[in-house]
Image (cartoon, rainbow, N blue to C red):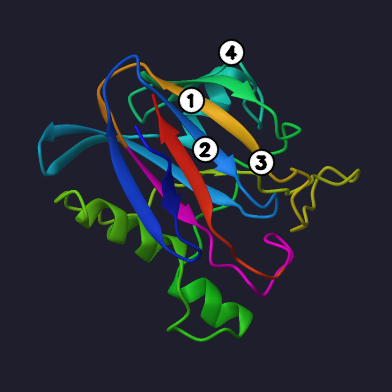
Amino acid sequence: MPQQTIPARHGIAAALNAGETIKVINTHGTQVVDTFAFTLSSPSTISTQLSMQHTRASLNKIIPQPGDGLFNNKREKLLTVLEDTSGGIHDTMIAACDRQRYEELGGGSSHRNCADNLVEGLEGLGIEAPTFTPSPLNLFMNIPVHEDRTTISFEAPVSTAGSYVVLRAEVDLVVAFSACPQDILKINCGKPVDAHCEIS
C-alpha cells in the first residue's frame, strides 16, 4: 500500500488485517506520533482498545521493545513490535493531549490536540470514537524518569529523520495516529510536522 501522510497536528486511522504490518515513520526525526488501536464488534463500533496500563503490567517495563506485545483492556495481544530504528525511546505514561491540557498550558481551548485528532481519524472510517480517550503509545516521545524515581520531564525526541517502528497486527483491528500538535513543550522540538506510515 502506498505511504500515507499523518499530517502535522492531525489524525488518521486505518484498518489492519491480522498478520499485516504498519511502519510508522518519524520522517523529520522530531515528531511524536500518538498511537491507538481498537478491535471492532461491528464496522462502526469499538469493542476493545489498546491499553498502556495493561501493556506495562504484562511486559514489566515502561517502554516496549522489538519482540514485545501490546495488549488491550482485556489483556489480549493486539500488536507486536517487530522493528525499531529510532533509538527505542517512547512513552506509555502520558495521556493524549486535549483541550483542557492546552488551557492548563496557556495555549487556549481551540488548540488542536490528540484527543480530537483521534476522533477525526476514526470518523474518517465511519467509526464512533470512544467517550473516554485511551492513553496512547506515544511513539518517539521522550519522557525521562529522573534519578529521584518520582519526577519526569518532557524532552525533545532522540529519534533521527527517517527512523521508524514496525508493528504487526495479531488480530483484525483499526489503528489510529495523531501527529501530536504540542508546540508549547519540547516534545516535538516546538514545531509539529508530518509523519508517515506504510501498511504491508
Give the amino acid at mark 1: Leu
Specify the quadrant of the image occupied by residue 145: top right
The residue singled out by tag 3 in the image is 162
Query: Which residue is the site of mark 4?
Result: 67
Whole-number angstrom distance, CA of label 3 to CA of label 2: 10 Å
Determine which residue is flagged by label 2. 24
Q: Are marks 3 and 2 in contact (CB under 8 Å)?
A: no
Per the image, label 4 sits on a secondary structure element best described as loop
Task: Judge from the rendering whether residue 122 lies leftward or rightward of residue 184; answer left or right.
Answer: left
Is residue 46 rendered to the left or right of residue 174? Answer: left
Mark 3, mark 4: which one is toward the viewer?
A: 3
**Marks 3/1: CA–CA distance:** 16 Å
Asked whether disc 1 touches disc 2, contact meaning CB atoms under 8 Å apart, the reply is: yes
Name which of mark 1 and mark 2 comes first in the sequence: 2
Q: Badge 2: how crowded within 10 Å, few (<14), some, or many (20+)?
A: many
Farthest front residue? 2
Can residue 83 be seen in the rendering of this structure? yes
Magenta highlight range: 175-189
Occupied quadrant, residue 116 = bottom left
Badge 4 amino acid: Gly
Tell whether label 1 touches label 3 (CB within 8 Å).
Answer: no
Q: How far across and down, in percent of the image, does residue 128 sit? A: 17, 52
Q: Nearer the viewer, mark 2 or mark 4?
A: 2
What is the C-alpha distance between the residues marked 4 and 1?
10 Å
Residue 43: image x %, image y %? 10, 38
Residue at screen point 11% across, 44% down: 44
Q: Where is residue 2 in the image (x, y as percent from the top left)?
A: 37, 37
Q: Which element is circle 2 on? A: strand
